[in-house]
Amino acid sequence: MAGFSFSFSLVCAALLGAFLVSAKPMLRKERVLRDPELSRQAHEDNKSYQYDHEAFLGKDEAKTFDQLTPEESRDRLSKIVDRIDGDADGYITTDELNAWIKRVQKRYVYENVVKVWTDYDLNKDNKISWDEYKQATYGYYLANPEEFEDATDKFSFKKMLPRDERRFKAADLNGDLAADREEFTSFLHPEEFEHMKNIVVLETLEDIDNNGDGHVDEDEYIADMFAHEDGGPEPDWVRTEREQFSDFRDLNKDGKMDLDEIRQWIMPQDYDHAQAEARHLVYESDQDKVRCFSCRNKL
Ligand SMILES: [Ca+2]
Ligand SMILES: [Ca+2]
Ligand SMILES: [Ca+2]
Ligand SMILES: [Ca+2]
């Protein structure tokens, strides 16, 4: 799509239109990583533009926008659009939009890390060592191990500490057992980083693999999404999920999911959410054929 550019004002108009429609959130929890930082809102443009707002502005900024008058929105938006238009030629390419959305995603993640940094970096050397993290998170357990000896819970500290250590080491790219900002960000938000994806897949398997045989069978897959409490018949959607398991999850048809199959499930290939959203916004802009009357002359 490089070189395929769109009028600055049309992109602006589509986004502004989006801001004037009230949003209805649709929340759904699931394992598949759908770029949660892009937006937790469902993408359904007939009813809501919240997804676009959050993808474009980041969650906090989108919230602020909800409280502005249309005029104020337009003002703020025109300034943002100007920043996206890197070469200031008055046009925004899908590549420019894509890069912007990715920056917004990461910004949210990095801001999150800034908020918790001082809780861990106790000696203020601007690094979080594995020891600092371990003490801050597990200090009480380590000091009172007898209290937790009998804990068998799968998320007990005995299980979580080695798991955190393994993740910390995967994030610690230079191997000095201390995390700088970048390394700590990938530790806390591994799903955002390419080199952490193996760990995310492995942790997902471990979460669901109740009998610890290193695979996820159909019952474990179902148990992760549905608690069968009264022993009655399973609801229809659970039967559908069982079919999903054998038809789409268990790709090599050996009756269970291995790491590769879990990766394909939670990280579907060939789908770049930022790119898709950029194209979508540009498509909407192109459809509208409406001029954003004040974007340019307000700058
Ligand atoms: Ca430190
Ligand atoms: Ca390091
Ligand atoms: Ca298993
Ligand atoms: Ca399989």
Image (cartoon, helix red, strand yellow):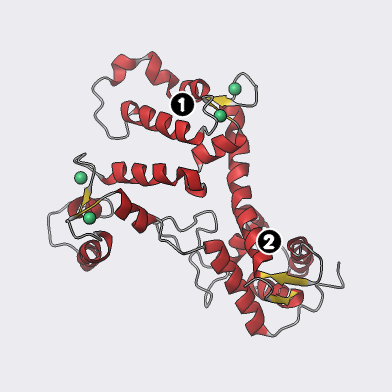
Q: Is residue 21 visible?
A: no
Q: Is residue 16 left or right of residue 119?
A: right
Where residue 173 appears, x then y in whole percent?
53, 34
Where residue 43 appears, x then y in whole percent?
50, 68
Mark 2: amino acid? Phe
Where residue 219 appears, x then y in whole percent?
18, 53
* Secondary structure under the numbered disc 1 in the rendered image: helix
Say which residue appears at 42% left-offset and 61% top-offset.
269
Where residue 298 appears, x then y in whole percent?
86, 69
Do tag 2 and tag 1 residues touch (Cβ < 8 Å)?
Answer: no
Q: Which residue is mark 1?
A: 137
* Secondary structure under the numbered disc 2 in the rendered image: helix
Q: Residues within 10 Å of mark 2 (few under 14, many from 20)?
A: some
Q: Which residue is mark 2?
A: 65
- In the rendered view, tell whether residue 128 sits above or below residue 30: above
Q: Which of these two is toward me, 274 or 251?
A: 251
Q: Earlier in the sequence, mark 2 or mark 1?
A: 2
- In the rendered view, tell whether residue 151 sits above or below residue 284: above
Q: Is residue 264 left or right of residue 58?
A: left
Q: Which of these two is toward me, 159 or 167?
A: 167
The label number, if any, that marks residue 220 in the structure image: none
Any atom of ligand 1 within 8 Å of the CB at mark 1?
no
Mark 1: amino acid? Thr
Q: Is residue 124 left or right of residue 248?
A: right
Mark whose residue sits in front, 2 or 1? 1
Marks 2 and 1, Cα distance to the nearest angstrom?
36 Å
Q: Residues within 10 Å of mark 1 (few under 14, many from 20)?
A: some
Q: Which of these two is toward me, 263 or 204?
A: 263
- In the rendered view, tell whether residue 238 sits above or below residue 220: below
